[in-house]
Amino acid sequence: MKWIAAFAVLTLAACGGEAADPEAEFQRDLAAARDQARASLSFFWERFADPGDGEYDFSLKAAFPRRDGQPGEEEAWVQYIARAPDKIVGELASAPRFLGGLKKGAIMSFQESQVVDWAFFQGEKLLGHYTTRVMLPRLDSTQADVLREVLSSDPKGGD
């Protein structure tokens, strides 16, 4: 009877002790970062409408439908933004990979529901960048070190 109990414990331990899937964990962390960014978007819009001293370079990261014939979206940072009641407009901050022939500087129009992250400088510190904070371990070490220097310790400031 003891061997049955021991076998049951070992079987349960084997099932519960499976190695975590790093990619799945990364995707969960990224999804949580997007949710946090969206939940704090009102903070971004308040600062955007009435920037404090030293607040500048407001940008948004939005999810755009791919234009390369494949399903899915590409997330891209948009700078020089303007907000209208029915849309947001801005320029792509970098060259996209899956948005057809669009290049850095292309004018993009999108809905607030497409926003997945936000950012702006407050003095020398960069606020927001929720998704970037999750991606830091996957970036080139030099790039990650530079970002760590400018990212505020709290995405909403208060350093």
Image (cartoon, grey):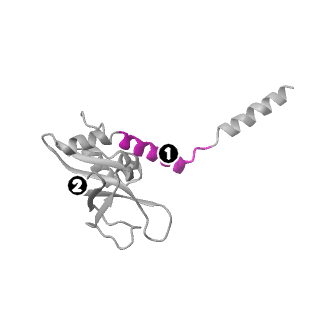
**Nearer to me, 118 or 140:** 118
Give the vertical position of 106 relative to 130 (above or below): below
Q: Which of labels 1 and 2 is toward the front? A: 2
Q: What residue sits 37% from the left and 43% below the top? A: 38
Q: Amino acid at mark 1?
A: Arg
Residue 57 spot, x, y in % from top left: 20, 51
**Nearer to me, 123 or 102:** 102
Q: Is residue 24 magenta?
A: yes
In the figure, is residue 43 to the left or right of 134?
A: left
Label 1 secondary element: helix
Residue linked to disc 2: 82
Label 2 secondary element: strand
**Nearer to me, 88 or 39:** 88
Crowdedness near tag 1: few (<14), some (14–19) or many (≥20) residues, C-alpha within 10 Å: few
Q: In what quadrant of the picture does the C terminus appear?
A: top left
Residue 129, label in figure: none
Residue 82 spot, x, y in % from top left: 23, 55
Give the vertical position of 102 relative to 54 (above or below): below
Q: Quick one: which residue is furthest to the left in this view?
A: 53
Q: Amino acid at mark 2?
A: Ala
Residue 43 spot, x, y in % from top left: 27, 39
Q: Which residues are magenta?
A: 19-39
Is residue 121 in view from this perspective?
Answer: yes
Residue linked to disc 1: 28
Q: What residue sits 64% from the left and 42% below the top? A: 18
Q: Is residue 156 magenta?
A: no
**Nearer to me, 50 or 97:** 50
In the figure, is residue 12 to the left or right of 138?
A: right
